[in-house]
Image (spheres, rainbow, N blue to C red):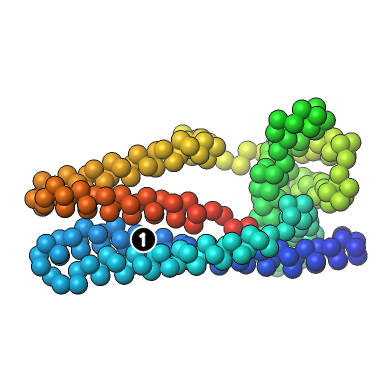
C-alpha cells in the first residue's frame, strides 16, 4: 500500500494532471467536430458547383456555411488546447502520476477477494493497463539521451534496456500475466519505480532492470502483420507519411478536374478552380485529422 506521504503526493498530482487532461480532451473533441464539418465539404463543393451552373441562387451557402463553421471550431479547439498545454505538468510529474495510478488500480485489484467482484477486478486491471500505457508513452517520448556523449556512456544502455523491458515484459504482464504470480511481481516492480522516480540513480535503474529480466517472462501481445508493420513504419517516419498523404490528395484533385472537365463539360478554368478547392479542403482535412487524432492522455 502507498505510504501517507506517497498518497498525499498522488492526490496533489491528480489535481494538476486532471485539469491538464480535461482541457486537452475538450479541445480535441471540438477539433474532431471541426473535422466532421470539413468532411461535409467534400461532397458539398462539387454539388454547389453543379447547382451554380444550373442557375440555382444561394448555392454557395452549401459550401461556405460548413467551411465557416470548420474555421471557427478549429480555432476554438486549438485555443483551448493551447491553454491546456500552458498548464501542462512537468514530464516528471506525469510519469510519477501514471506510476501511482497503475499501483493504485493494481492494489484495488488485489484487495477484492470475493467471487462476485470478478467484473470489478477486470475494471481495475483495465485501468491499471491504461495507466501503464500512458506511463510508457511519456517515458518513450521523453527519456531520450540524444547525441550527448556523456549521457550515452552513463545512461544510454540502461535507459534503452529499461524501455525494452517496460514494453516487452512489465506492461504485457500487467495486461496478460497470471494474477497470482507475474501480476504480483509486476505490481512489486511498480512500487520500486515509485521509489526510483523520487530519487533516481543508475544503480537502482540497473537493479530494477535485472529484477524485470529475471522475474518477468516476455509476453507477445499481438502478431504483427504487414499492415501493422507498415503503420509502425509511417508512425516513425513522419516525412514519408506526410508525403504519401499529400500525394494521395493531389491525385484525388486531378481526378476531380478530369471529372468536371470531361464528364460535366465544365470549362478549363471552372474545372481547375473546383479541383483547387477540393485540394485545399482535403489538405486542410488532413492537417485537422493529424491534430484531432492525437491521443489525449487519460486522467
Mark 1 residue element: helix
User: Which residue is at a point 19% across and 69% down the rendered structure image?
Assistant: 59
Q: Quadrant location of residue 26? A: bottom right
**Count of residue discs:** 1
230 and 263: which one is in front? 263
State the image coordinates of residue 63 (x, y, percent, origin top left). Answer: 27, 65
Circle 1 residues within 10 Å: few <14, some 14–19, many ≥20: many
Query: Residue 49 or 237: which is nearer the viewer?
Result: 49
Q: Is residue 31 left or right of residue 169?
A: left
- Residue lying farthest to the bottom in this orientation: 58
Kindly identify the residue that appears in the image at 72 percent across and 59 percent down: 89
The residue that disc 1 covers is 38
- Quarter placement of the C terminus: bottom right
In this picture, residue 173 sits left or right of residue 2: left
Q: Is residue 51 left or right of residue 144?
A: left
Place of residue 127 in the rendered image (x, y in percent of width and height, measured from the top left): 68, 59
Name the residue nearer the viewer: 2 or 279: 279
Where is residue 225 drawn, in percent x and y?
49, 35
Going by the picture, which residue comes out furthest to the front? Answer: 269
What's the residue at 46%, 35% (across, down)?
240
Is residue 220 left or right of 71 when viewed as pictured?
A: right
Indicate whether 86 appears above or below 237: below
- Residue 233 visible in the displayed image: yes
| Along the line of sight, the residue nearer the viewer: 19 or 128 | 19
Residue at 25 percent across and 59 percent down: it is 45
In terms of image quadrants, where is residue 246? top left
Please indicate, yes or no, whether residue 25 appears anywhere in the rendered image. no
Quadrant in which the N terminus is drawn: bottom right
Kindly indicate the quadrant of the structure image that contains residue 122: bottom right
Amino acid at each position: 500500500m502507498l505510504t501517507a506521504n506517497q498518497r498525499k503526493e498522488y492526490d496533489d498530482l491528480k489535481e494538476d494532471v486532471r485539469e491538464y487532461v480535461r482541457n486537452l480532451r475538450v479541445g480535441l473533441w471540438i477539433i474532431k467536430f471541426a473535422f466532421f464539418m470539413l468532411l461535409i465539404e467534400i461532397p458539398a463543393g462539387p454539388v454547389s458547383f453543379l447547382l451554380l451552373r444550373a442557375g440555382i441562387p444561394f448555392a454557395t451557402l452549401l459550401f461556405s456555411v460548413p467551411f465557416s463553421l470548420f474555421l471557427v471550431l478549429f480555432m476554438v479547439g486549438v485555443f483551448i488546447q493551447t491553454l491546456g498545454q500552458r498548464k501542462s505538468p512537468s514530464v516528471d510529474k506525469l510519469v510519477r502520476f501514471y506510476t501511482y495510478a497503475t499501483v493504485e488500480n493494481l492494489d484495488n485489484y488485489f484487495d477484492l477477494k470475493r467471487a462476485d467482484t470478478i467484473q470489478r477486478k477486470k475494471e481495475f486491471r483495465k485501468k491499471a493497463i491504461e495507466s501503464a500505457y500512458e506511463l510508457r508513452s511519456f517515458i518513450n517520448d521523453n527519456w531520450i539521451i540524444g547525441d550527448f556523449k556523456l549521457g550515452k556512456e552513463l545512461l544510454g544502455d540502461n535507459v534503452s534496456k529499461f524501455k525494452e523491458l517496460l514494453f516487452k515484459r512489465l506492461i504485457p504482464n500487467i495486461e496478460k500475466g497470471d494474477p497470482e504470480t507475474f501480476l504480483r511481481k509486476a505490481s512489486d516492480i511498480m512500487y520500486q519505480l515509485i521509489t526510483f522516480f523520487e530519487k533516481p540513480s543508475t544503480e537502482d535503474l540497473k537493479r530494477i532492470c535485472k529484477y524485470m529480466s529475471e522475474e518477468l517472462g516476455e509476453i507477445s501481445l499481438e502478431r504483427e502483420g504487414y499492415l501493422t508493420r507498415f503503420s509502425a513504419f509511417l508512425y516513425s517516419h513522419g516525412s514519408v507519411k506526410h508525403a504519401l498523404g499529400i500525394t494521395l490528395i493531389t491525385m484525388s484533385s486531378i481526378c476531380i478536374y478530369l471529372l468536371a472537365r470531361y464528364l460535366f463539360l465544365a470549362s478549363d478554368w471552372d474545372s481547375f478552380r473546383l479541383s483547387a478547392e477540393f485540394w485545399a479542403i482535403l489538405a486542410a482535412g488532413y492537417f485537422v485529422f493529424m491534430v484531432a487524432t492525437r491521443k489525449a492522455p487519460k486522467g
